[in-house]
Image: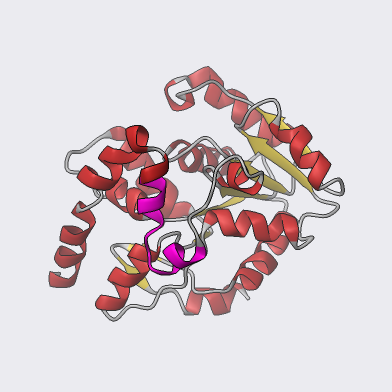
Amino acid sequence: MRTDMARTRPRFLGIDFDAATYGEVADRLAHLALRETFTFVVTPNVDHVLMLNPTSTADKTLAFQQAYSAAEMRLCDSRILQRLARFHDVRLDVITGSDLTRFLFENGRLDGQKVAIIGGDEDMVPELHERFPTVEIVQHRPPMGVLGNTQAVEEIIRYIAQERAHYVMLAIGAPQSEIIAHRCLLAGKSVGVGLCIGASIEFLLGRKSRAPHWMQRLGLEWAFRLASEPRRLWRRYLVSGPRIFRLSYQWRAR
């Protein structure tokens, strides 16, 4: 299956995306989860693409780019990216991190497996245990802004190595999740597969609401999220976000 997915990887905005269905991705993850080496998966969205193509150079950007290059799979997490790619004659399959996390939990793909969650609050694991009692779940809660705390980063890497979970779900935001997953890979002491999932578990538990399906199909989920959290997201969607159109034009010109 790895060969098939690699053979059909479309390239857009400098990223080689994996073309697959949720079931195919879950099958691939099940294989990776049993390996004695650590791998990880990233879910590119507009925000990630903009961070990968900054207006000024930063060390964090380089680390983020290196993490993306080292990822086992890159799954398109944005219908806006999908529509932009289609305009440039590139076909992308949308596999959102939120829907993939829900698919794994609700379709029994994690039954009997050990899942380590990095991030979240103290109530998250009890809530998950109540809904999914057949999944073994452990948790490590690092401090905020962990990427700037060398000791806290090392604690995450040690925790992932010692727990030897089948699935590691990093819920500490981008680019922290991706960079730390890459460092786990480089350390060479962990097993299983890492998923950079953002707020996926909060959506799964109903703490945050997803946009209605009709808004998702039209690529308007960003508008729903902006209306839900305007103070936190207005700059991302109204100031930084539109730069994606210029990037796509420049990519086509090259």
Q: Which residues are magenta?
A: 213-226
Observer able to see residue 159: yes
Q: Quarter of the image containing the C terminus?
A: bottom left
Q: Is residue 246 magenta?
A: no
Give the x, y percent position of residue 210: 52, 52
Observer able to see residue 163: no
The way the protein has been coloured in the rendering is secondary structure
75 lies above or below 152:
below
Q: Residue at x 81, y 40 (%)?
A: 129
Q: Residue at x 44, y 69 (%)?
A: 217
Relative depth, front residue between 47 and 8: 47
Q: Residue at x 64, y 48 (%)?
A: 204
Q: Quadrant of residue 41?
A: bottom right
Q: Quadrant of residue 90?
A: bottom left
Give the x, y percent position of residue 62: 32, 41
161 lies above or below 80:
above
Relative depth, front residue between 114 and 127: 127
Q: Quadrant of residue 108?
A: bottom right
Q: Quarter of the image containing the N terminus?
A: bottom right
Q: Is residue 221 magenta?
A: yes
| Secondary structure mostly taken by the magenta-highlighted segment of the chain | helix
Count of number-bearing discs: 0
Q: Residue at x 53, y 26 (%)?
A: 153
Give the x, y percent position of residue 107: 75, 63
Image position of 46 (left or right of 125): left
